Amino acid sequence: MLVYVIRRLGQAALVLAVMATLVFIAVYAVGDPVAILASPQADQQELEAITQRLGLDRPLYEQYGLFVWNALHGDLGRSFVYNEPALTLILNRLPATLELALTALVIAVFIGIPLGLYAGLKPQSLGGHSIMAGSILGFSLPNFWQGLMLVLLFSVMLGWFPAGGRGTTRELLGVPVSFLTLDGLSHLILPALNLALYKMALVIRLTRAGTREVMLQDYIRFARAKGLSQSRVIGVHVLKNILIPVVTVLGLELGSMIAFAVVTETVFAYPGIGKLLIDSIGRLDRPVIVAYLMLTVVMFVIINLIVDLIYAAIDPRVRLEEAKA
Amino acid sequence: MSEQAATPAPAAAARPTDKGESLLLRHVAAFFESPLAVIGLAGLVVLVILALAASFIAPQNPYDLAQLDIMDGTLPPGSESLAGYTYWLGTDEQGRDLLSAILYGLRISLGVGAISVVIACAVGASVGVIAAYAGGRIDNFVMRVVDLQLSFPAILVALVLLAVFGRGVDKVIIALVIVQWAYYARTVRGSALVERRRDYIEAARCLALPKNRIVFRHLLPNCLPPLIVVATVQVAHAIALESTLSFLGVGVPVTEPSLGMLIAKGYDYLLSGKYWISTFPGIALVAAIVAINLVGDRLRDVLNPRLSR
Amino acid sequence: MSQPVLSVRDLVVEFSAREGVLTAVNGVSFDVHAGEVLGLVGESGSGKSVTGLAVLGLIDAPGRIASGAILLNGEDLTKKSEAELRRLRGRNIAMIFQDPMTTLNPVLRVDTQMIEAIRAHEKVSERAARDRARDALAKVGIPSPEERLVSYPHQFSGGMRQRVAIAIALLHRPAVLVADEPTTALDVTIQAQILSEVQQLAAESGTALVWITHDLSVVAGLADRVAVMYAGRIVEEGHVADVLERPAHPYTNGLIGSVPSRNKRGEPLAQIPGMTPSLASLPPGCAFAPRCPRADAVCKNPPGVTHAGDARAFRCFHPLIPVEAAA
């Protein structure tokens, strides 16, 4: 296991290095970094200051070194709009997005897995067919439009939930979260649901396919022949087998959820990093865009790493294969 | 890789290049066995015809300002215009007939989706088949790039690309091609690896045919079925992605509004209960995506003997 | 003789398929007594495995037990609710399966799978269940059982896995054990070990064995009585020695003839011509008739059961043994 962890860490570091280099090439080598990193209103003096700070008068490899050095020290430039370090800006918005994504993940799992199990155990029933039809629809609805329709239905027509914003937050371990206050929770529900629906459709499909496959296995028959109750067979023998692919996919999807939060946050005016990104693109606040990109890459690499490790922990066969390799 | 395993040999006689009409006919017949797929195909055909004929059948040209009357702004569906005809789906804030705007928007949405898929497909398939044929380091390198790219969500990559490029139909297409080519490369490589080991490729090699002829005339055509399936589904993805980008304000420009942009414009009016500006273009968008997905699902069943069994 | 532990009467199992209703088991009857081993022999598709599953009440949709009775110590299992069946499964009647690679859940440790089997039927502490699981592993010949308890199935060899499965099946000393080709997937040497171990364990606990196999040589060494199945019916039944030495049904004769060891070197291996018929297109009358060298016009009618002496019975118009003893 230790060897496995170390090797995965090495791979993750490699991906990070490659991505950092790509960002460097995109921003520094191809484009005019001064133009990209300076505000359009900057005067000649500011431009020179930036040229100086980025070391653009020095050879390319030194520039690269400086870029990496600055990035490693958390210096990804300053936002023109907020006049704050871009990284700080993003980190301040990050908890809101993480809360949104995790809530959506919880909704997707706790509703999707039972529905998928049901559809897998009774594929020919009316309920099974309805669940599958719903999941196909969930795949086809464009996320942003689905969000608008949620707003139309639950905010405008029914008036149950607010249409946007984050609501009152409360500190939890120094991080502001909204699920602890009623107001915050009511602001959280619609965006989280919107973000969750697509993933829920995915969870339902995976769970259903997995359930149908596992139910045909000899070990399920053997478990039943042992006289185990239905709940034990399904709750332990079936569930533990289908959880492996579901957890893997979901873990990888956590990253895509943070990416898709861009859409949901825009629809619901939810103050997370996705909304910040869209606002920054609209205002040409490029340092924030670059910082968002770097941070997302780091997050993705970490998420992929964690998923692989969890995967290895759940499935004993992975450990064995890795040990052999 | 699953695509590899999912491309088993039907009977040797059923290889697409040996074809004959019979195989094609059989596939077509199999396709029409599913009522849902037929509904999807019919819907898709209708939508495409509507989009192509938009300038002839739309009640007004929504982008000819002379035909718009600002006094007709945000009228609900069914309202009469000052000029005397009915806005069946209402109007937007500039007094534009929404039905006409949707027909024009559909044309842009479907067009961007289809063009980007065709280009991405050509690029991805070429890269994939070459990687599979060359093998070794080239293959390894290409697949690393593909894996790396696919580990980031398409929406994010496209968003960043467009943030750098700026808005524009051509730029949206380029961004869509860049985020999509990897799917095709992976799919084609998977089936090409299987095909490469078959006798007819061996035979072509023994005849000392030129490499590019083997690759593009012999290998690639036999990798088509899975490619068609992926491409169909990707058209739906491309349309959804384009509309999302346009909704976010980084996609098509205001002068060439796709369905996504129409929806974005209606967003401001949604909260005051003027639901139609966002709702109807959305329904058109969903109809297009569902129709394509139904067709794609059936194509997968028909073209993939292992799954249909 | 005493009352049989398990008595199957006119069992019919049907599957609804696209082609219509398929009768996988068609009027099967047999008895097994305590401590006895019944060999249930047939080719794949003959309905022997379905019969085994039916005895455990494990026939799932689209299949169902259409008629007949399965009497376990006189109680009809087909009339029991799922909850009642569950209490009997694993405790009074157990089953082991063909492929040891797939009978154990790959993601659960062996101790989990054994302890749950114990606690499904007895209210004992985790601790006590664990001790019993360890003893059961030791009994089936698994070395260092304490350590093996915390292993996952993939850490065992095929033979060891089947031993674990057997240990689980025998945890509650069931009255009946249905073994569905449990040694087919194993090496010949392991097969012999497992056969003798199961035989010994079953004898110790007085468990009646229903041994499902396609391999007559296994039956020869293991079973007391044998029932030969063809296309959903038992075509011949009797004591092992009688049936193997003086087969009455041409199909049994063909099966015996195709065992390699009984053929002379150099001669082509005897085989039954034709193929196992599809359940969807069974001929009327005797299902074996199209492949049978002795078949004639009479065989277009369904053959009845002919009883011939000591527990001997067959369904054939043209048996290979004289029928003067027929009742």
Image: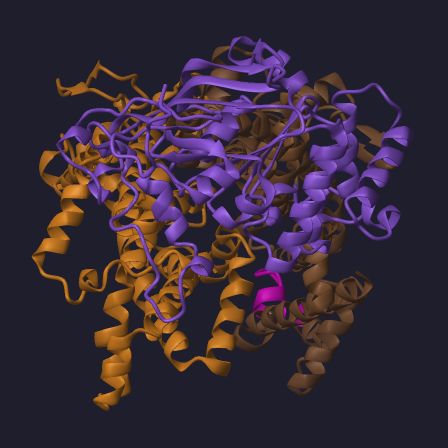
Chain colours: A brown, B orange, C purple
Q: Is residue A323 above or below residue A171?
A: below
Give the left or right position of residue B216, taking residue B93 as reference.
Answer: left
Quadrant of the frame with the N terminus of chain C: top right
Can residue C235 be seen in the rendering of this structure?
yes
Q: Is residue B65 left or right of residue B182?
A: left
Quadrant where the C terminus of chain C lies? top left
The quadrant holding residue A168 is top right
In the rendered image, residue A40 lying in the magenta stretch gets the answer yes
Task: Examine the image and state in which quarter residue A96 appears.
Answer: top right
Extreme bottom residue here? B208
Question: Which quadrant of the view contains residue A193?
Answer: top right
Q: Is residue B175 visible?
A: no
**Nearer to the camera, B243 or C231:** C231
Residue at figure coordinates x 26%, y 17% from the top left = B77
Image x and y of residue B87, in percent: 21, 21
Nearest the eye: B197 or C111: C111
The residue depicted at 15 percent of the width and 32 percent of the height is: B60
First to last magenta residue range:
A35-46
On screen, residue B280 above or below C218: above
As drawn, C126 above or below B78? below
Where residue B9 appears, x then y in whole percent?
30, 61
- The extreme front residue here reads C324
Q: Position of residue C148 (x, y in %)?
A: 82, 49
Q: Is residue A96 magenta?
A: no
